[in-house]
Image: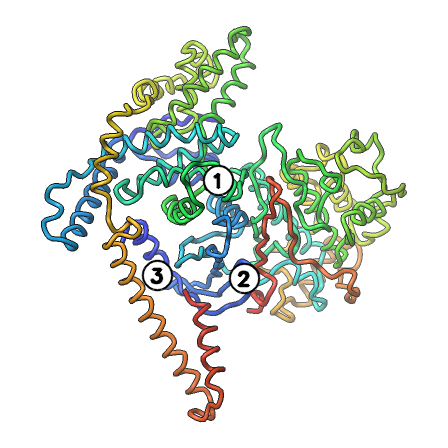
Amino acid sequence: MPVPTDVSSETPEPPRKRQRTLYEASTQYRNWRFSTAQLSRIRASLNEAAVAAIRNTFEADLPGSSSDISFLNADEECLLVKLYATKIPQLCAHFGFPEEVEATAISYLKRFYLKNTVMDWHPKNVMLTALFLAAKTSNQPIPIDAYTSRIPKTSPSDVLDLEFLVAQSLGFEFTIWHSYRALWGIWLDIQSLPDHPKDSIAEIYNTAKSHARAARLTDAELIYTPSQIALAAFSLASPNLAALWAHAKSSDSVLQVIEPIKQMILQDSRTPDVEAVRNVDRRLKLCKNPEKVVGSRVYLAKKAEEEKVAAAKRAKKAEEIRKTMEENDPFGEHIADKKKLDDAVNRALEDDD
Amino acid sequence: MDAVEKANYERQKQWAKEKKVGEGTYAVVYQGREAKTGRKVAIKKIKVGAMKDGLDMSAIREVKFLRELQHQNVIALLDVFSSKTNLNLVLEWLETDLEMIIKDRSLVFLPADIKSWIAMCLRGLEFCHRNSILHRDLKPNNLLIAADGQLKIADFGLARDFADPGYKMTCQVITRWYRPPELLFGCRYYSTAVDMWSVGCIFAELMLRIPYLPGESDMDQLKTIFRALGTPTEEEWPGHTKLPDYVPVGQFPKHPMRDLFTAATADCLNLLAKFFIYEPRKRISAKDALSHPYFFALPNPTHPSKLPRISAQSTRTLEEVDGNVDLDSPGPAVKAPPPVPNRLKRKLSSVSESEDGSYARRLDFKKTDRTKT
């Protein structure tokens, strides 16, 4: 796989006469790549909007009630998401899912929180749904009962209720290009280099794989291409071989691009400190959006309001249909069979969304 | 309203459903329009609420692949949005499908027309294969035809990425008449060659105007294949007797293809035979098929806009027909034979097992009067 070197820089590349690579046609390339600065901007503004909205909801319910609440900031949100990302490999081992499912689920979880905030949707549930969905999109579907019965304190609706929201947040873009696959390609390439070390190579590959796995807990995949991350992982395992490979591909310059990725893998891939996360989670209980807490007063009020709007819409539509039908009926008011008309109206409404 | 909900609402507003044009068990197809431009679209509404296991596998596959694939000969997924608990796929509007065209007995196919359809089918398929995607349900009914005559591969409800080496796939894919013998023998490791067999069947069907290998059951399908193409020998297809579901179905001699495809040129027969090579690894790929001499020999493929179409009764002037045939006149153009009784009734959908053994529910979207306009 060719390794574009211009991906992380924000300066546009000079126009080149070449065919677009398959990766460049992917939704990942088109819609899910950001600069570090863009990522922090997105997260900060999501957080800000969420805090404002939740504060409003609290105030509307009971004025003054939001003043002593300490909302989460964007970094704290990230910390919580990261903790739940570390749970995915454990669950995958539990279910015997292949690496593709694991990597896909983690990507889904990260992408989800570029569109949503943990104060609305707790990552525990989103993580379970992301994994369930990833199993399906990676050709390893599992019946919902078989899934939830093996996870403590989880019901099918905990997973299914969020599935649509998760799919929507992903923009229905389910295909993920993974760095572990690119790494496999690099490993195959390296074995065909004339002067590669024959004995230690399997061990190097295993070390590189663990670095690629560690990279999943970082933002790397949202910033760099899978092949860049793969080469960084390989370079952490064996800088010499990585350089040899880059040279063989006449792409020495890529070695500079992967330096920040290597840093990122080493620094950002640690599992968050449990005590710190527990503290965040405790505060989250107080500051989460009451509209999303099933059964709460605010939740019920919102549902009732939605139902009212929907009912009004249905009634209006039913009236319209009835009117048209009566107008079209040559016998107008003499309709004997009122039930028939009602049925027709209901049928028409069923088709409606 | 959440940002995600809001974005969805914005998308939903861009598309207006107009009328229902088809209904299957899991989906309803509407004719609709893009609000801004008035462009005609098809909106496929998938009822998700009814699914026990959440989003349906066919819907997931279809969305997953169509989101990535952008090619002139693959149906375009314009947008996806939700309404309540329904998933809505906005697809480009396509007038008809190749099955309707093949069955329309008033249409006459020239060799150049067949070449054009097969070339477009191969181009679309080569693109799928280049993107590591197997279609796994190619048949005339899934090759839709746009108003400008372009052929578009549709229905990715059974598609999947190539499996990694060592991962099993289900063999219960591809509608029976278009299914290759390795799948009928229960092969669980396979690749692009399965789609190529289907292309061969479609190619043959375009020439014959009836399905080439219409088996009545899976067992009969093997017999039908071997009756037509001869029972494979061990030399021709090494190891096939070791496949999981192998059963001997009798020895049938090989007949020269020319006996049946009387009007075909030598190039044409040569390519056709390559789609039907028993050994999957030797079967021609989409890429190689596109550089086959058949496509470089006269007659040149008909321009898509000039292909036979259903609504237009006689758009083609006699002159054009004559000129076209004159270029390379291997025989008379093919007219559809009279309909064959029940035995050849087309099964529109196939129920098939997915990788985990559960049933992947097929969405059949095109079977009603979607094609009427």
SS of the residue under disc 3: helix
Q: Which one is closest to the eye, mark 2 or mark 1? A: 1
Crowd band around label 3 with a 10 angstrom C-alpha radius: few (<14), some (14–19), many (20+) = few
Above or below, A33 relative to B223: above
Q: On the image, numbered disc 2 is attached to which residue?
A: B147
Q: Chain of mark 2?
A: B
Q: Chain of mark 3?
A: B
Above or below, B258 relative to A264: below
Question: Image check: A189 left or right of A226?
Answer: right
Crowd band around label 2 with a 10 angstrom C-alpha radius: few (<14), some (14–19), many (20+) = some
B175 and B149: which is toward the camera: B175
Q: On the image, numbered disc 1 is attached to which residue?
A: A149
**Residue B327, image quadrant:** bottom right
A157 and A40: which is toward the camera: A157
Q: Quadrant of the C terminus of chain A?
A: bottom left
Q: Could you say where residue A309 lies in the image, as x and y percent from the top left? A: 29, 66
What's the CA distance linking mark 3 and mark 1?
39 Å
Q: Chain of mark 1?
A: A
Q: Give the color scheme: rainbow, by chain, secondary structure or one colour.
A: rainbow
In the rendered structure, which amino acid carries the disc numbered 2?
Ala
What's the CA distance linking mark 2 and mark 1?
51 Å
What's the CA distance linking mark 3 and mark 2?
26 Å
Q: On the image, numbered disc 3 is attached to which residue?
A: B13
Residue positioned 15% across, 38% down in the render: A70
Crowd band around label 1 with a 10 angstrom C-alpha radius: few (<14), some (14–19), many (20+) = few
In the rendered structure, which amino acid carries the disc numbered 1?
Ser
SS of the residue under disc 2: loop
A180 and A131: which is toward the camera: A131
In the rendered structure, which amino acid carries the disc numbered 3?
Lys
Query: Is residue B316 among what the camera can see?
Result: yes
